[in-house]
Amino acid sequence: MNVGWLEACLLLSAALFCLGLATALARGNAIMVLVGVELMLNAANLNFIAFWRWGPQPDATTGPIFVLFALAVAAAEAAVGLALVVALHRHRRSVKLQEARTLRG
Amino acid sequence: MFTLLGFVVIAVVLLGSAAFAVTRLNLIHAGLAFALTWLAVGAFYLWAGAEFVGLAQILVYVGAVSMVILFAVLLTQVRSAATSLPINLDDERRLGAGLITAGSAFGLLGAAILTGRPAAPAAPDRSLTAQELGTALMGPHVVALLVIGVLLTAVLIGAVLIAAPTDPEIVEDGP
């Protein structure tokens, strides 16, 4: 079992993914849950770059291109999610997800 | 040697700041630590040779997303519960469940990575110039680029519509 660069980068991104997963599951604050999702997205992007750099496919620009598009989509997701958090706070005076149980406004 | 040192420094800063941030009860401290985490991710891209992607990561995440998160924290903060939220039994149960899930996921991923088939040896020095990236974006990926433009416009309008007060008479009464 030899740990090369690819395995080291994959382990790093797995650790970041699990930190994001623990955040999204364990924290009750809607902002922290969103940031946990962002951490998981970042871990996926780390994998794309790691496979582009140390993967078996030469001359493939697909990894960085995918990361660029994922960056744009993640920024859009963060903007909409935080707007939803602000709207939730306006309606319920709280950003705890356990207290947002109904679909009524 | 320098490559290994860079990787260790980036990994320590990345995981340390993320672990620091997710355990904070004060959301402003957490947001600032997350900015450091995203900076470390950008440093990883620079270290791996994807310079343009690294700088885009720093611009988008450190510059924009962390500022949006800090603004959302400030806009939704209630003064009485600003620093210390009480942790009741429900929170502790969810904390345990989240830690167990994340720990088992890490065990599974780590075992899969370490026991997997080794990858073929890569090209020794691989880097991507901005010109190659631009050619690829404007050539095979131009449809996705246009769709992303439309998506960002829709998100801009949608976020304003969601976050703006529906009734102009309603003015936020401060905390």
Image: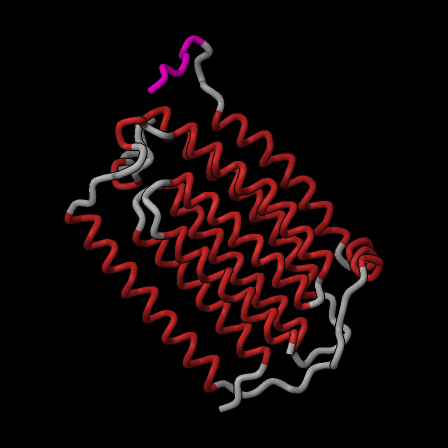
Please state the extent of the stretch shown in magenta in the rendering: B169-175
Question: What residue is at 27 percent from the left and 65 percent from the top?
Answer: B100
Front-lying residue, A58 or A22: A22
Front-lying residue, B139 or A63: A63
Left or right, B114 with reference to A94: right
Residue occupying the far left of the picture: B89
x%, y% of residue B16?
44, 60
**Residue B47, picture quadrant:** bottom right
Is the N terminus of chain B in the top left, top right, bottom left or bottom right quadrant? bottom right
Residue occupying the far top of the picture: B169
Count of number-bearing discs: 0
x%, y% of residue B21?
41, 51
Question: What residue is at 32 percent from the left and 71 percent from the top?
Answer: B104
Question: What residue is at 20 percent from the left and 40 percent from the top?
Answer: B86
Q: Main secondary structure of the magenta part?
A: loop
Left or right, A63 with reference to A35: right
- Coloration of the structure image: secondary structure
x%, y% of residue A11?
48, 73
**Residue B140, picture quadrant:** bottom right
Is the C terminus of chain B in the top left, top right, bottom left or bottom right quadrant? top left
From the viewer's perspective, is residue B35 above or below residue B53? above
Question: What residue is at 58 percent from the left and 53 percent from the top?
Answer: B39
x%, y% of residue A39?
48, 55
